[in-house]
Image (cartoon, rainbow, N blue to C red):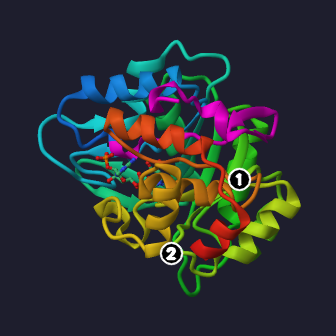
């Protein structure tokens, strides 16, 4: 089947709280570098046309400035591009955002998990997205010695959930003990951590435990691996190339398919500002890898 006829439904579904999404989603961070917002808007609309109903974002995804800090000219916020492309939002669309960082042109990107900071970030997301509630909010932490508890910040978000501003809560960049802490305070629907075929770190036990607890595990940097913000990995292991050849797929598609095969609770959020990459990524949800292929990929 031609790549652009495969929809996100091919990857199957998962339920985040009370919201069912296709396991192949879209990460919006890469929509901000393009100086032409019209292209980013086309990519976002095409993603939804191709069945994507789970979009990841953050109010600090903005260029210039923000996480990628690319280019010059007027600020392009991913949240505002999403609104321009997709509002009024389709009923089935789940937008997941993250807090724990703020951005403004004077201070740049800064960590802020204070109660006032988190509330301001939630309100900024509501304003930029043009919504009266947020579907899923991840608390994105920085792991560092002496800063080992998520309880206080997660409690603030749990209160905002009780107040109706947030429907579901998640965590990002966390360990299992953070998940334990958070689940004692309020339900957690997803954990979003860096994870890729060549960058598994210590993630596998956490990934498995999320599955056992019915919590979605959502890898970011599945294509970028250790290159992180710098962009997709260009060199792939021989096994990735071999599996790609066998399926008539690209190595990047195999990287995405590998993550989806790590468990039925694993959701993909590949990021791109390129319409061709978008179609390829969604089509990767239709790849079915055999046990031997998964073993070869490691
Ligand atoms: N929780 C967190 O801390 C955190 C951190 C970072 C990101 N995220 C989220 O996770 C999402 C994914 O992360 P990411 O976008 O940084 O990395 P990624 O999805 O691993 O890789 C994106 C990079 O791969 C390229 N790419 C995409 N599709 C491709 C394809 N089919 N073939 C070749 N190259 C391809 C993109 O360039 P093109 O634009 O040219 O396609 C971009 O440079 C983000 O968009 C964001 O929503 C979360």
Mark 2 crowd level (few <14, some 14–19, many ≥20, 10 Å Cα): some
Which residue is rendered at x = 77% and y = 53% of the image?
188
Which residue is rendered at x = 49% and y = 36% of the image?
125
Q: Residue furthest left?
A: 72
Q: Which quarter of the picture shows residue 59?
A: top left
Which residue corresponds to mark 2? 199
Residue 269 vs residue 94, the one in the foreground: 269
Asked if residue 226 lies left or right of residue 211, the reply is: left
Helix, strand or loop at disc 2? loop
The image shows residue 27, relative to residue 92, as above or below, that is below
Asked if residue 10 lies left or right of residue 280, the reply is: right
Residue 251 vs residue 1, the one in the foreground: 1
User: Magenta stretch containing residue 216, yes or no?
Assistant: no
Which residue corresponds to mark 1? 190
Tell us which disc is closer to us: 1 or 2.
2
Q: Which residues are magenta?
A: 1-30
């Amino acid at each position: 089947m031609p790549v652009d006829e495969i929809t996100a439904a091919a990857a199957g579904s998962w339920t985040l709280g009370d919201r069912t999404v296709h396991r192949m989603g879209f990460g919006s961070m890469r929509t901000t570098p393009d100086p032409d917002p019209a292209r980013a808007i086309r990519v976002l609309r095409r993603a939804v046309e191709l069945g994507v109903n789970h979009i990841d974002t953050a109010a600090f995804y903005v260029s210039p400035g923000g996480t990628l800090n690319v280019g010059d000219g007027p600020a392009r916020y991913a949240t505002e591009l999403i609104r321009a492309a997709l509002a009024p939002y389709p009923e089935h669309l789940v937008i997941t955002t993250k807090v724990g960082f703020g951005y403004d042109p004077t201070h740049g990107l800064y960590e802020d998990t204070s109660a006032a900071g988190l509330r301001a970030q939630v309100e900024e997301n509501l304003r930029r997205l043009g919504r009266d509630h947020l579907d899923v909010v991840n608390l994105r932490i920085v792991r560092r010695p002496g800063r080992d508890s998520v309880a206080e910040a997660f409690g603030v978000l749990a209160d905002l959930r009780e107040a109706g501003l947030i429907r579901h809560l998640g965590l990002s960049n966390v360990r299992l003990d953070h998940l334990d802490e958070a689940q004692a305070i309020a339900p957690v629907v997803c954990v979003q951590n860096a994870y890729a075929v060549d960058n598994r770190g210590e993630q596998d036990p956490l990934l498995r435990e999320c599955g056992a607890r019915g919590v979605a595990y959502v890898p970011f940097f599945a294509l970028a691996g250790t290159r992180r913000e710098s962009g997709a990995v260009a060199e792939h292991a021989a096994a990735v190339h071999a599996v790609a050849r066998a399926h008539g797929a690209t190595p990047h598609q195999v990287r995405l398919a590998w993550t989806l095969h790590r468990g039925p609770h694993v959701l993909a959020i590949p990021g791109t500002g390129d319409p061709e990459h978008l179609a390829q990524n969604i089509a990767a949800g239709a790849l079915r890898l055999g046990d031997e292929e998964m073993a070869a990929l490691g």
